[in-house]
Image (cartoon, rainbow, N blue to C red):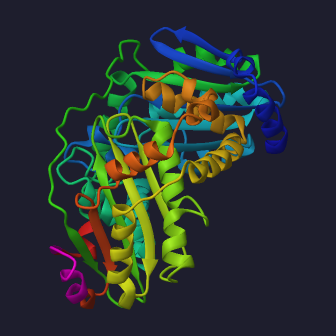
């Protein structure tokens, strides 16, 4: 199925107007609806978008994320097991995704079962009771998972770097909460949070499938318990913090290597040039032929892999360089990365090679109609049109070596980036030779 969709999509990218003609917009009372027509298979994908996310949690960090995960925990009529059995009987897949700015709840299955499936999902939104026993199970599972992250040093480094790089912004606290906040969430918190999303937060619906999927309109409007007056949209106001260049050492016991992350928080005005950020990060650390891979692995054997990323959400962005090395070569690797960023020499030929590779790979990101639909959702969240989606290859053509050099210097500034090293405390001596070091215990980030 994916291969067939991809072949059609590749053809349609050659004439963007063809696929744009399959995107239809509707208004169901106060709910905006986007339908991507796709009648090739008797299946559907539906995503409910809510215009608020984890920033609504206040002091109850992690509540929104866990609330959406617990929607199937039980209602006044059905137990969790009965709900799960019913959805499995219809072959339905559900899932939620919460970020700071917005939240989504997705459903997919066979169109022949769409009616009873949507009725069941609406029942969950309208009547979830969040039984204490299921809440306790979920909290124990999350706490266990957080403890186990200590065995995955790469994931722990990413978690810690997000917090140190986001310090001073509204986005610093992890969406999932921390151990000390999850344990304090109670049943009424979940009920109140669901009521808030049902009655106050603006919603949008994204649908892909045959035209018959639009028959869910009356079910959605009458059975989900959503208020027609729900208009709240999360709007974030903040000032980008000014921070000194700092090396953060996160100490963990018995580390056999050092995890290294470099990058910075990108405020408004720093992350909006999507195409330039994409080409620049791909050139810097997008594969085996990238600049950092050549310098760190091919020439010096300091690491096995390195990656670079720069991009944004609606209200903020991030730049990241991630890698690892032996503890004894940690300082050397950081010096090499800083030297590379300080002395970038790029030719148009090198940039053209990167752009041609990206052009060939770009359509493969959308190997399913649901993935394509999620990109439309994200662009709507950004309040952007779909130009960058359909004209990506055309838009990167004018990007020059000078553009890439300037972009890298701007979003990966050597003297402004946070540098995080996760490893044993003995690394402190070598890291102090590179600059100011702040030491953290890994438990502070759990």
Residue 79 position in % (x across, y down): 54, 46
Image: 392 above or below 329: above
Image: 370 above or below 149: above
Q: Nearer the viewer, residue 29 or 425?
A: 425
Q: Residue 202: which quarter of the image?
A: top left
Say whether residue 60 is visible: yes
Image quarter where the C terminus lies is: bottom left
Q: Is residue 132 magenta?
A: no
Instruction: Tell me: 232 left or right of 87.
Output: left
Residue 277 position in % (x across, y down): 45, 44
Q: Residue 340: which quarter of the image?
A: bottom left
Identify the residue at image location x=53%, y=79%. 299
Span shown in magenta: 428-437
Identify the residue at image location x=20%, y=83%. 433
Say whether residue 46 is visible: no
Q: Is residue 433 magenta?
A: yes
Instruction: Tell me: 206 left or right of 271.
Output: right
Residue 420 position in % (x across, y down): 30, 70
Image: 173 above or below 317: below
Instruction: Tell me: 69 left or right of 208.
Output: left
Identify the residue at image location x=38%, y=74%. 336
Q: Nearer the viewer, residue 243 or 116?
A: 243
Identify the residue at image location x=47%, y=82%. 302
Residue 35 position in % (x across, y down): 64, 20
């Amino acid at each position: 199925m994916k291969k067939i969709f991809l072949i059609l999509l590749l053809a349609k990218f050659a004439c963007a107007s063809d696929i744009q003609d399959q995107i239809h917009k509707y208004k169901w009372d106060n709910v905006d609806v986007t339908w991507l027509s796709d009648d090739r298979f008797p299946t559907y994908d539906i995503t409910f978008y809510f215009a608020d996310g984890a920033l609504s949690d206040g002091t109850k960090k992690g509540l929104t994320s866990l609330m959406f995960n617990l929607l199937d925990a039980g209602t006044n009529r059905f137990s969790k097991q009965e709900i799960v059995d019913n959805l499995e009987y219809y072959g339905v897949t559900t899932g939620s995704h919460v970020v700071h700015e917005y939240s989504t709840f997705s459903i997919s299955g066979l169109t022949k079962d769409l009616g009873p499936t949507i009725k069941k999902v609406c029942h969950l939104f309208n009547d979830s009771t969040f039984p204490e026993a299921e809440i306790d199970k979920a909290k124990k599972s999350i706490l266990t998972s957080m403890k186990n992250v200590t065995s995955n040093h790469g994931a722990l480094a990413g978690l810690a770097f997000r917090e140190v790089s986001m310090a001073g912004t509204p986005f610093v606290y992890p969406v999932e909460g921390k151990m000390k906040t999850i344990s304090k969430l109670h049943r009424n918190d979940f009920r109140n949070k669901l009521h808030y999303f049902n009655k106050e937060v603006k919603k949008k619906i994204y649908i892909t499938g045959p035209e018959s999927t639009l028959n869910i309109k009356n079910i959605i409007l009458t059975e989900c318990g959503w208020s027609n007056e729900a208009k709240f949209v999360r709007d974030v106001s903040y000032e980008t913090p000014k921070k000194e260049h700092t090396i953060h050492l996160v100490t963990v016991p018995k580390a056999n290597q050092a995890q290294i992350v470099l990058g910075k928080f990108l405020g408004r005005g720093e992350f909006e040039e999507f195409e330039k950020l994409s080409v620049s990060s791909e050139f810097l650390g997008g594969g085996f032929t990238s600049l950092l891979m050549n310098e760190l692995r091919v020439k010096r054997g300091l690491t096995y892999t390195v990656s670079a990323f720069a991009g944004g959400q609606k209200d903020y962005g991030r730049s990241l360089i991630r890698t690892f090395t032996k503890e004894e070569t940690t300082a050397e690797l950081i010096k090499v990365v800083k030297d590379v960023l300080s002395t970038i020499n790029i030719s148009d030929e090198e940039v053209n090679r990167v752009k041609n590779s990206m052009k060939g790979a770009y359509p493969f990101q959308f190997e399913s109609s649901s993935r394509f639909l999620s990109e439309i959702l994200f662009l709507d969240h950004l309040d952007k049109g779909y130009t960058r989606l359909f004209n990506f290859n055309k838009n990167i053509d004018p990007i020059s070596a000078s553009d890439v050099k300037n972009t890298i210097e701007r979003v990966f500034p050597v003297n402004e980036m946070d540098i995080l090293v996760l490893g044993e405390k003995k690394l402190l001596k070598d890291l102090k030779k590179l600059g100011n070091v702040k030491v953290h215990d890994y438990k502070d980030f759990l």
